[in-house]
């Protein structure tokens, strides 16, 4: 006899396709606002991992979400989350990120700054062989979506990708308005240009990026001298 009932897993997936940003199960409701805001919506026991929006799940969800389409929710996260004492839990290359911030006289980016940096990193830098896990955002909620959590460390050289979109990418202008949090990403793009890696000619088609490279050539080269000895992804 054929059952007319949906399995539990399929039931969750069916609901998830209709989830809106205003639905309480949507991760945006956990992750946009800092401190205890999400607990008023979801309770204090959501997976034991989602008490605040600086957690690994929220940071990876927001990075994945905003990489696909940087919209008003991404702008809100960037503007609202100005705390600068949290670690970058969604960073793929911790070594590069931390060395760059140390090089810039111990710069301390905010959560909002780190979101932009992580989005641009994932859009334009590939890390072959990086370890990753696909997990449910909130295992206590049936229709909670799945997210990808990447390892924070890589020991292999990186590659540039999607550079043909650089000339028209609005996030490049946003990045260059506050370049310090993204300095390791900028330096990796510059290194690709120096090495004449594939498609790096597109970097010079973005006039803002071209101008930044020219004005900051000396400091970029100083960082690259350090990076080539200490950062595996810059090898």
Image (cartoon, rainbow, N blue to C red):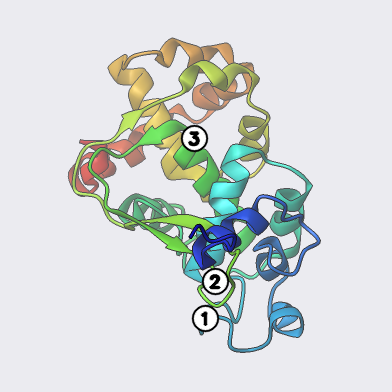
| Mark with earlier residue (1, 3) | 1
Q: CA distance from mark 1 to mark 3?
A: 29 Å
Q: Is residue 33 left or right of residue 94?
A: right
Q: Residue furthest bottom?
A: 44
Q: Does 187 appear above or below 212?
A: below
Looking at the image, do the residues carrying marks 1 and 2 touch, with CB atoms under 8 Å apart? yes
Tag 1 residue: 47
Q: CA distance from mark 2 to mark 3?
A: 25 Å
Disc assigned to residue 17: none
Mark 2: which secondary structure? loop
Q: Which of the two residues, 158 or 181, is positioned nearer the viewer here?
A: 158
- The part of the image, by quadrant, that contains residue 52 is bottom right
Mark 3: which secondary structure? helix
Q: Does 46 appear above or below 55?
A: below
Disc assigned to residue 138: 2
Tag 3 residue: 123
């Amino acid at each position: 006899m054929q059952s007319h009932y949906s399995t539990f897993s399929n039931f969750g997936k069916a609901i998830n396709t209709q989830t809106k940003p205003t639905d309480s199960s949507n991760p945006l409701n956990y992750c946009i606002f800092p401190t205890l805001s999400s607990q008023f919506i979801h309770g204090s026991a959501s997976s034991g991992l989602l008490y605040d929006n600086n957690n690994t799940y929220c940071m990876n969800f927001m990075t994945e979400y905003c990489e696909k389409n940087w919209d008003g929710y991404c702008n809100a996260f960037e503007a609202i989350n100005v705390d600068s004492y949290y670690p970058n839990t969604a960073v793929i290359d911790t070594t590069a990120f931390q060395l760059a911030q140390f090089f810039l006289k111990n710069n301390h980016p905010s959560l909002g700054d780190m979101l932009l940096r992580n989005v641009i990193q994932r859009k334009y830098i590939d890390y072959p062989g990086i370890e990753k896990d696909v997990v449910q955002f909130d295992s206590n909620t049936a229709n909670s979506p799945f997210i990808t959590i990447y390892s924070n460390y890589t020991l292999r050289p990186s590659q540039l990708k999607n550079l043909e979109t650089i000339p028209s990418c609005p996030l490049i202008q946003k990045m260059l308005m506050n370049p310090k949090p993204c300095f390791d990403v900028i330096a990796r793009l510059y290194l690709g240009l120096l090495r004449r890696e594939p498609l790096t000619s597109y970097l010079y088609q973005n006039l803002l990026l071209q101008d930044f490279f020219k004005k900051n050539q000396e400091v970029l080269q100083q960082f690259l001298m350090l990076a080539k000895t200490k950062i595996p992804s810059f090898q």
